[in-house]
Amino acid sequence: MSTLQVKKVPEDLKARLVRQARARGLSLSEFVLEALERALDEAEWREGLAQRAPVDLGLPAARLLEEAREEGWPPSS
């Protein structure tokens, strides 16, 4: 495992990170690693989505959602 050092972190950002880490019962390092992983996962997901061909639904997506809601979707739990 390697070490990564981040310099020039604004004090307010560090305070927010520490606060969130404590709220989750994590060390600052654990919380930052999880946050980086989530950010990378999202960025990679968006990149993959951007590479997909558009899909023609035949109608605007908003209209399809409206119709689905009128039909009672999603079902109540």
Image (spheres, rainbow, N blue to C red):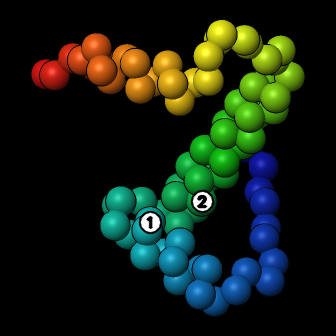
The residue lying at 66 percent from left, 48 percent from top is 39
Residue 51 image offset from top left, x and y in percent? 86, 22
Comparing 58 with 33, the one in front is: 58
Q: Secondary structure beneath disc 1?
A: helix
Q: Looking at the image, is 39 positioned above or below residue 25?
A: above
Q: Circle 2 — which element?
A: helix
Residue 20 occupies quadrant: bottom left
Of 61 and 13, the residue lying toward us: 61
Image label count: 2
Q: How far is the residue under mark 2 from the one under mark 1?
A: 8 Å
First in sequence, mark 2 or 1: give its number. 1
Residue 10 drawn at (x, y percent)? 70, 86
Of the residues shown, which amino acid type is indicated by label 2? Answer: Val
Label 2 crowd (10 A; few <14 / some 14-19 / many >=20): some
Question: Which image quadrant for residue 47?
Answer: top right
Location of residue 19 in the rendering, given as x and y in whole percent from the top left corner: 43, 75
Is residue 37 visible in this depiction of the protein? Answer: no
The image shows residue 76, relative to residue 18, as above or below, that is above
Residue 32 circle label: 2
Q: Report the residue at 53% width, 55% height from top.
A: 30
For this orientation, the residue located farthest to the left is: 77
In the rendered image, which quarter contains the N terminus? top right
Residue found at x 79% / y 17%:
54
Q: Amino acid at mark 1?
A: Ala
Asked if labels 1 and 2 touch by Cβ distance under 8 angstroms, the answer is yes
Locate the C terminus by quadrant.
top left
Compared with 47, 38 (above or below) is below
Q: In the image, 5: left or right of 66? A: right
Residue 13 is at least partly visible in this image: yes
- Taking the image as shown, residue 20 lies to the left or right of residue 46, namely left
- Report the residue marked by disc 1: 21
